[in-house]
Structure formats: structure tokens, C-alpha cells
Image (tube, helix red, strand yellow):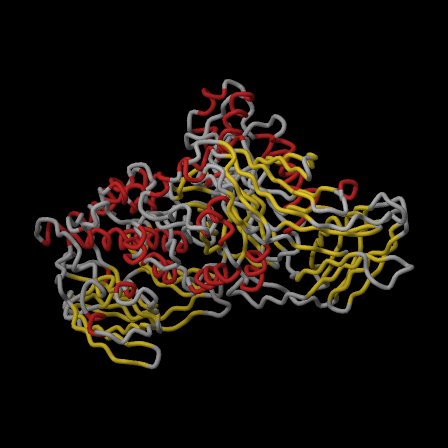
Amino acid sequence: MITQDLPDGWTLTAVAGPVPAELVGVRVRARVPGTSHTALLDEGLIPDPYLDRNEDVLAWMRRTDWAYERQLDLDPAADDERVDLVFDGIDTVATLTLDGHELGRTANQHRSYRFDVRGLLRPDTQRLRVLLHSAIVHAESEAERLGARPLAYPQPFNMVRKMACSFGWDWGPDLQTAGLWKPVRVERWRTARLAQVRPLVTVDADGTGRVRVHADLERSGLPGGDLPVTVRARVLGADVTVVVPRDRTEAVVELEVPHAPLWWPVGHGSQPLPELTVTLGTASADDPLDTWTRRIGFRTVEVDTAPDDDGTPFTFRVNGRPIFVKGANWIPDDHLLTRITRERLTRRFDQAVEANLNLLRVWGGGIYESDDFYELADERGLLVWQDFLLACAAYPEEQPIWDELEAEARENVARLTPHPSLVLWNGGNENLWGFMDWGWQEDLQGRTWGLRIATELLKGVVAELDPTRPYADGSPYSPGFALDEVHPNHPDHGTHHEWEVWNRVDYTVYRDDVPRFCSEFGFQGPPTWTTLTRAVRTDDGGPLTKDDPTFLLHQKADDGNGKLDRGLAPHLGVPDDFADWHWATQLNQARAVAFAIEHYRSWWPRTAGAIVWQLNDCWPVTSWAAVDGDERPKPLWHALRRAYAPRLLTVQPRDDRDMLAVVNDTAGIWQGVVHLSRRRLDGTTLAEVELALAVGAWSVGLFGLPSEVATPDDPTGEVLVARLGDVQTVHTWVEDVDLALDPSPLTATVTPVQDGYRVDVTARSLARSVTLHVDRFDPDAVVDTALVDVPGGETASFHVRTTVRADPEALTRPPVLRTANDVVVPRAPQTAAGAARDLESSR
């Protein structure tokens, strides 16, 4: 096979729609992959859509038609030669022509297209044209034709197979890109090619690895196309060749690998990735017709949903071992998808691993990610839960949506089978829940809404093409029950989404449920200060406020600021100063999520996983993300790192008393003597005890707090410190608004080190959530830890990596060095007896 990539030589023109006068008829250079936004940005013809209120300025692009064009100089095909134009991804609704001859029409961003052009080639220059029609106009037309279906947002994204969040979401912009978002190339080939290769990898009980390679062939249909061909597969010394007769277009090659090296999730073992090579050839030629190479991993995966006394579990088992999932939901890492590089994904995956995550859930309103994404997951041992791309809407089951969904599912299931990191196919996000609770049934009036898509179409594709992996009808989902038998979001059955917290109730309500698996929960917070002030500016250049129209355009959640304030009030109070409010909301986000995770982890194995919403952002925005749109970790990222640590101490309520939960997510026994001390905030010890304990591998131990340290004399002025080895937790009996916190509890010193500075802080009194906002010192600086509770009389150290050498003392004072103490808005003082009554009533 001879391949010619076509990244250059393209032009882009706006050809219809509400185009600004200065762009009418303008032909600009365009690269592929690319979109109308990236092409115009490269030429300086539009402002950055991520800055200020430019999202609104560029609203005209949503209803514009675009033409990508380029010249083709291709030699005519030989008598036995196929010549194909291959488009790996078109965004989205397009008509393709070569010298005016229509090659085809597309309406699906999530699949590839191939056109046989051998009969159209001429010896002179030809013109290839891709006319991209407005996706929203197409979707509106389909909604009128099929009848509208309910959905979570105003625009009918459920009527076109395009990235749902391209139409805007409660954390993302409404840009509605259009373009050739994946590579375009010419392929010239003879006889046959490998149309699809699916390696199904399993491991026997005795450790023998098996690879069943399914190879689907396309024959040329030209002279020589009916020859017998061979398919050869090789991995780890296993080498098998089969002959495919002239009348067949598929082959299965069975490989056996004794004592196969097992692939494990991060934290559970290593990630060996042997290379599998599949070669298509003929008996009469030495050179192969086609070759396919991928790395694979030997492992087994299942999800245990066998009913038990508590309901229906949802527990991942890899190589037979139950795994507590420490996860985060994943959205596309840049709304302008063609700017996502392997290097950018590498940085994000490193942040995920450093935060002690072991799973990413690719959410159904985004995309099937690039090969780079899944390869990086394989290498790092990050499990991948893959949604099919259906989210928060009722989807028609009529044509052409049904066939388009089947085509994209078949292509992407086959594409992703080599990756050991992929452990679940999920039928969609919140659609089952939406049907039950969001008023859809009345709106639908009996029209189709996607139940058969989830329970028949997608389930059937996975069963046929990838039976080595489990499938779930949706998330949330109660396995084994009809929707009218057990609610799909029932916490005792299967997967659960917890959105009452954030939307309606305080985050302490997380403890009211013990879900079997929480696949979505989260809390909002703004991006880092540097990201925010770079991208969100007032019209007059004055100070930013949370009510400024530009800030609100980058706050997409319904009543987002109101929910932030109501979430703050019981814990930290609501500061008036914007910089204080920014820090307080970031801190409250981190605490809310950590509160949930510690609760969920303490209930293992009843609760088998937590997937926080969300790891990443796609632009600068106030959102649920732990890493903001400029790739900077927010305080939440540090909270995830601590809450998901392999070993965790946390105080949790059980049966009206406080218990010390000792969480051991490692392969060895965690044993030792835990030191428990009840102290005044200034560090004075009031009572202390030592407790010998041992907790087995991959287990949780619960230990009652001895009476001497379990109950404070004065809840507003005391703290419990528990330390086991190098792991510590600091527990207070009341919220910070009720603690007698010193607003300025620290002294700090800074010492130069080789790659930056060490900042040592000493607490005169309890210092809560000590954090260095190093981006306010150097936008590129990185700090090793944050949100550190420092008991009175103790010292903590922070390592800041930076090249900046100006004014290092800035690291020892606001706005860089902050605590909860300096931002809390105290409630009116109350007596110790009143605080004790509040403590008792809160239990």
C-alpha cells in the first residue's frame, strides 16, 4: 500500500450564512486536521474565542457553511490498482466532490469515510471540494422531520452525530466547529487490504495468554483481487499464518502465549505491552500487501453485578482482583479538538497518575478519543471507561440516526479492542435517568427516545465485536432491572450519579447514601488566578467581580455563583472581596470533593468506586475540573491527590460515633501504631492515646476512637490529630466558620534550592488548608503539595519549582500564601456548650 497524506494545500472559504462583510469571499490557507475556527485564528481573522466575550462575537460561525478545497495531482490508476480518498474524520455535515462529481455525503463526526476515486482520476490537476453545511441548521431540520426529543440544553444536538458539547454545556462554550478534524490521505493498493483488525485478548486460569485476531479484508474487485491471500499474526514468539481463500474476506488467527505477562492497573502491578503484528500477503510476492501493528496487554476484566444483601454491586475485577476505582470523568481537553496533541495528553495523564487516579471515564457528550489517548492509558495503567456518545438527551431510533450510530459503534469498538486499559463500554450518560425523572415521558408522547439503542443496538455490537469486555446500558444504571422495577439512579444498585449535592443540598449530605459505585459527583470552583485573569477581563479594564458579564459568560452552570455562595456559607462564609471569594470557592470545591471521596473509600468493598466530575477543562471557565483550561492544577487537584492516596486516614461516622477509617489500597499489610491526640488549637495536648492496628492489602479497617480523644471539651477550640507513619489527618468537630481560628496563624521562611525554593511554614495556632498559589508568583511555577492542615506548634514544608528569582519573599505572604483562616467569615461567637449541642445535633 502507498499512502500520501494531504495536510497542506487546502483553502477555506465561507460560502453561505451570516458571514461578516470583511470575510465574504475571502479564501484563507487551511491545514488539515483543522476547523474553520483554527484556520481563521491562524490567519488573524477572528479573535480568540476563549477570551473575554468572544464566544458571543463569533456566534455567526454556527450558521455558516464552509468550503475546504485543494488541488489534487494524482497519477491515473493502473488496471489492477485501487485509489481511495480516506477521511478519518469530518466535522460534520458535508458534501464531497472531485471536479464537481459527488463522492458522497456525511453527517457523522465520529466515524471515517473512504471513497474509491480510481474511475475519476485524470492526468491533469483536479479539484477536491468538501462543502461543510451548518450542523445546527441540519439538526433543526431533522428535529422538524422526526419530531423534537427532550434534551438538557436548548439546541437539538441529539439530531446530528456531532460532539454534543460542541453546542455548549454547563462548563463549555457554544462554538459548533466545522472542518476536517482528522487526517485526509490517498491510499493506493492492489489485491486486498486490511479493512479491520480486532485482537481479542484473554488469559486462561493457568496463565496462558490467548489472542484471537479477527481480520476483515477488503478486496479490490480488480484483476488479481480474487487471489488467495495469507494473514500472519505474531506476538511474543507466537507466529501463526492462515490462508484466506479467494472467495473469503475474513480470517481468524489464534495465538497462544504460555505464561503471558499480565497487564495491571496502576498501583496493582506493571504494564507490559508486547507488540502484535498482523501482515496481509500473497504466496507470489515477498512484500506485504498491508501491515497492522499495535501493542496489546494480557489481562482479564469483568464487572461483578451479582445481587447481594446490600443490593447490586458494580465492582471491577482485573485479573480476578477486585479494584476500587479512583477515577475522574474526562471531557475533550480542548474544545478546538485539532489542537489536542500527544504532548498535551501526556501532561494530562501524568497529572492524573500523580493525583493517584486509576481510571478515566470518557464521557458520552465528547468524542471517541485519539489513539494517543488510549496508548497513553495503556502505558500508565490508567483504566478507561468508554461511553458511547449519547448524553443527557432522548435520541431518535429512526433512520438515519440508527444506522449512523451502528456504523460509528462498529468502527470504534473494533479500533479500541487492542487496548488493555479499556475496561467498560457504557451505553450513554444520564439518558435512562432523564427518561424517568426529567419530564421526558410526557414530552415524548410515545416517540422513540433511545432505549433500544442502549439495550439492543450498542449492547449487540459489543457482544459481537468485543465480547472480552463488559457493557453497561448507561450511567447511572441499575443492572438486571427494568426502569420501572428499580430506578436507574438508585444508590443501592449499580452506578449512581450524585447531583443533589451541588444543585440543592450541602456537601455533608454525601454521607447520607452509600452507593455501590458513584460514577458522577462533583463541585464547582473557578480556575487558577492566572488563567482567570488572562482570559476573563472586564470591558473597562477595571477589577473583576463575580457578577461581571464577562465572568458570567465563563460561568456556564445554571445559577452557578448562587450555588457557590450557598455552598460556602455553612463552611467558610461568603467573603465580599473578589480575590478572597476566588480562593474560598476553590477551597470549598476541594473540600467538598475530598469529603465525598473519603466517605466512599471508607465503605469499600460495599462502595466499589468513585469517579469525580471532572479532571480537565476545555477552555478557561469556572467549572468542576481539577485542572483548568490552561493546564494548571487547581486546589482540587491536590485534594484528589490526598483523598485518592494509596494509604488514607479519615474520621468517619458509624452508628452514631466517630471511627478512624484506615484505608489501605496497597499490596502489603499496613500495620503500626496510630498516634491520636486531642489538642487545643495552639497545639497544647489535652489527651493522647496510641492504638496498634493492622489492615490487610486492598482493605479498609474501622477503629473506634478511644473516649479520651473522641469528644472535645470545647468544639470551637480543639482539634484531633491522627498520625500513622507518614500519613496524617486533622479532624475538627465544627466547621471553620465556628472554629476560633487565628486569622494569621503562620510564620514563613523561604530558602533557595536547586530548582526553586523551599517554603517552611510554622503554625502558632491551627492553620487550615495552607496553600501556596504559586501561579501568582510565576505562571509556570509548580508546588509539590497544597491544602495542608498544620497543627499549632508544627511546621510544614513546600517545594516550589520555578526559574523566577525576583522577590522570593512573595512566597511567604498573600496573595501567594493563603490559609482557610485568612478567608473564613466567622459566624457570631457561641458558647462552648452551644457548640457542643450543635455537634451532637449534626451527628
Q: Is residue 151 left or right of residue 407?
A: left
Q: Compare residues 632 and 691 and report the one nearer the observer.
A: 632
Q: Is residue 773 left or right of residue 692?
A: left
Q: Compare residues 570 and 334 and report the one nearer the observer.
A: 334
- In the rendered image, residue 413, in percent from the top left (x then y), is placed at 64, 46
- In the rendered image, residue 83, in percent from the top left (x then y), is placed at 76, 47
- In the rendered image, residue 500, in percent from the top left (x then y), is placed at 34, 39
Residue drawn where x is 39% and y is 40% of the image: 58
Give the answer, above or below, for where 639 lies relative to 130. below
Most extreme residue toward the front, as rendered?
A: 124
Q: Is residue 239 left or right of residue 152?
A: right
Residue drawn where x is 66% and y is 38% of the image: 407
Most extreme residue toward the top, as rendered?
A: 445
Q: Compare residues 486 and 183 and report the one nearer the observer.
A: 183
Q: Is residue 702 visible?
A: no
Examine the image and state in which quarter residue 819 appears: bottom left
Q: Quadrant of the N terminus?
A: bottom right
Residue drawn where x is 65% and y is 33% of the image: 403
Q: How many marks?
A: 0
Q: Compare residues 827 and 21 and report the one nearer the observer.
A: 21
Give the answer, above or below, for where 101 lies relative to 227. above
